[in-house]
Amino acid sequence: MEILNPRDLIREELKARNWTQEDLAQIIGRQASYVNRILSGNIGITARTAQELGQAFGTGGMFWMNLETVYKLRKCEGKRTCL
């Protein structure tokens, strides 16, 4: 089963809206470096960020929180330890 990476979906949303990472950062009230760290996979999507993304993209925070959680769980399937 394919694992949908929430970062890929954010990139698709940015492209569809013709937004840059800086545009998204401004919309959600964060530094551009924060958005970059999310898209680079250096940090996960927190509840606060999920709410901000939900407002920015009109999806609601629960969508992004669930997507992040399912992504992490699927990556852990079959592994003895998981981060």
Image (spheres, helix red, strand yellow):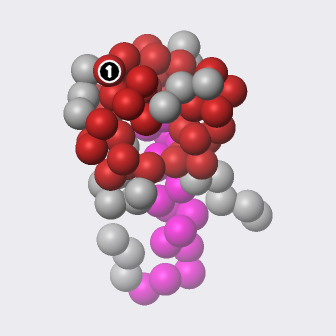
Check the image and name the residue furthest to the bottom: 80
**How would you classify the magenta stretch by its main secondary structure?**
helix
- Quadrant position of residue 47: top left
* Residue identifier under label 1: 26
Q: Which residues are magenta?
A: 64-80
Q: Is residue 77 magenta?
A: yes
Regarding residue 34, the answer to whether it shows in the image is yes
- Above/below status of 55 relative to 71: above
Residue nearest the viewer, comparing 50 with 82: 50
- Quadrant position of residue 41: bottom left
> What residue is shown at x 38% (from left), y 30% (from top)?
22
- At label 1, the amino acid type is Gln
Check the image and name the residue furthest to the right: 1
Q: Is residue 57 magenta?
A: no
Residue nearest the viewer, comparing 77 with 3: 3
> What residue is shown at x 47% (from left), y 59% (from top)?
72
Q: Quadrant of the C terminus?
A: bottom left
- Above/below status of 14 relative to 37: above
Instruction: Return the x and y of residue 39 as percentages of the image width and height.
Output: 44, 50
- For label 1, the SS is helix
> What residue is shown at x 73% (from left), y 61% (from top)?
2
Left or right, 4 with reference to 83: right
Instruction: Return the x and y of residue 27 as percentages of the image width and height.
Output: 37, 17
